[in-house]
């Protein structure tokens, strides 16, 4: 009898130790995300949903911490940290990402998309997925395209309504060679300046103007230092969310799935927030004294005719030419499908 009782107590203690040990030593994976924008920016709002979803689905197994306003470094620096394993995740515009993966140059083709629907169709299709996957050979896991929006031009010289209006304007660009080539071809004088130095550069009138999506124009208070906003929409500028591939691959499979699903939810929500805000932002910028003008489809077509082929040729010389051709073919195919029967 006592032997049976002893066995029962030993078994009970063994199970208890196992359960307590399991609770005590269950691994929690921490993920820090470096973001250049504020907590009010559409992409950061999307990442807050990402945090909520992933932490909920993993029951706290993955803890997400978002660091806005370039706290952990600028876009290029943050991606470098993710690549080297010093940081788990970051978002960045295509320009800085091209330093690490030249295929992202396809996102720098000017006047490639004439609507959000066209841009999203290509990014959410096979070519967009191939672009995200192409970074795995440099240690980055591409997860989704957080929203930044179409880029527009602001300046203190004149409204931009036609290609010749760019002539002689000194304009701040990202540190992105294809952005600079686009504006140089259009007749402007591009000057690369990091995001963190943008407002100071405009305040000191080092340049005449700059280019950014409306969300960024509002966020950094360009209305205090710029007179004109011209809705050129010259580049659609998503902000890919990337993770360190080694870190991602070490996660349990169910955690990987939660992160992948959460990233798509965050991407789509950031898109809807940005698109819904844009008209209101234009009105708010006008109320602050900025003069905003639409740029006609005909004028954009002329701008694209002047600069797009030059930029595409340079991109093909800098990266996988076949990939560039396939990217452009995907855009053309979407436009054909949309216009079929119309």
Image (cartoon, rainbow, N blue to C red):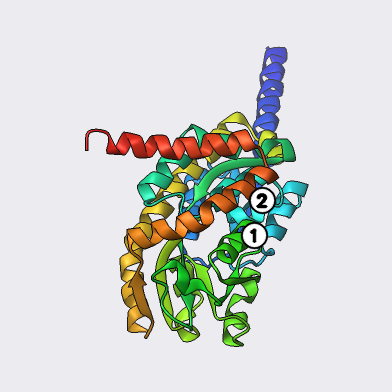
In contact (CB < 8 Å): disc 1 and disc 2: yes
Q: Residue at x 31, y 70 (%)?
A: 280
Q: Is residue 295 above or below residue 209?
A: above
**Tag shown at residue 98:** 2
Element type at mark 1: loop
Q: Residue furthest left?
A: 342
**Can residue 241 be seen from the camera position used here?**
no
Q: Give left or right: position of 93 versus 8.
A: left
User: What residue sits right under mark 1 in the picture?
Assistant: 176
Determine crowd level at label 1: few under 14, some 14-19, many 20+ residues with C-alpha closer than 10 A.
some
**Tag shown at residue 40:** none
Chain-order first, disc 1 or disc 2: 2
Give me the C-alpha separation between circle 1 and circle 2: 8 Å
On the rendered image, what quadrant is the C terminus found in? top left
Q: Where residue 252 sits in the image (x, y, percent)?
A: 63, 32
Q: Is residue 62 above or below residue 186?
A: above
Q: Give left or right: position of 245 versus 289.
A: right
On the rendered image, what quadrant is the N terminus found in? top right
Q: Residue at x 60, y 44 (%)?
A: 62
Q: Where residue 224 sits in the image (x, y, percent)?
A: 47, 85
In the image, 52 versus 334, the foreground residue is 334
Q: Where residue 146 sits in the image (x, y, percent)?
A: 50, 51
Q: Is residue 104 above or below residue 20?
A: below
């Amino acid at each position: 009898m006592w032997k049976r009782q002893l066995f029962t107590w030993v078994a009970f203690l063994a199970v208890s130790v196992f359960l307590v040990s399991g609770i005590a030593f269950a691994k929690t994976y921490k993920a820090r995300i470096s973001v250049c924008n504020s907590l009010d920016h559409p992409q950061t709002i999307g990442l807050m949903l990402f945090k909520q979803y992933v932490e909920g689905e993993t029951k706290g197994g993955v803890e997400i911490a978002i660091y806005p306003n370039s706290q952990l470094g600028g876009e290029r620096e943050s991606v470098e940290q993710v690549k080297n394993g010093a940081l788990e995740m970051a978002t960045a515009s295509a320009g800085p990402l091209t330093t690490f993966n030249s295929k992202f140059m396809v996102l720098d083709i000017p006047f490639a998309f004439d609507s959000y629907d066209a841009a999203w169709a290509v990014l959410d299709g096979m070519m967009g997925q191939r672009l995200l996957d192409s970074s795995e050979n440099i240690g980055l896991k591409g997860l989704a395209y957080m929203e930044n929006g179409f880029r527009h031009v602001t300046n203190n010289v004149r409204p931009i309504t036609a290609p010749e209006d760019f002539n002689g304007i000194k304009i701040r660009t990202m540190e992105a060679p294809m952005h600079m080539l686009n504006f140089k071809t259009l007749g402007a004088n591009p000057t690369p300046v990091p995001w963190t130095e943008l407002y100071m550069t405009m305040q000191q009138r080092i340049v005449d103007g700059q280019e950014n999506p409306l969300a960024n124009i509002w966020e950094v208070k360009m209305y205090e230092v710029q007179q004109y906003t011209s809705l050129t929409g010259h580049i659609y500028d998503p902000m890919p969310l990337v993770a360190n591939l080694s870190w991602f691959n070490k996660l349990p499979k169910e955690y990987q799935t939660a992160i992948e699903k959460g990233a798509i939810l965050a991407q789509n929500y950031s898109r809807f927030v940005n698109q819904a805000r844009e008209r209101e932002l234009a009105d708010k910028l006008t109320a602050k004294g900025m003069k905003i003008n639409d740029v006609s489809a005909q004028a954009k077509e002329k701008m694209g005719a002047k600069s797009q082929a030059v930029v595409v040729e340079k991109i093909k010389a800098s990266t996988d030419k076949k990939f560039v051709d396939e990217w452009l073919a995907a855009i053309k195919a979407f436009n054909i499908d949309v216009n079929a029967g119309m």
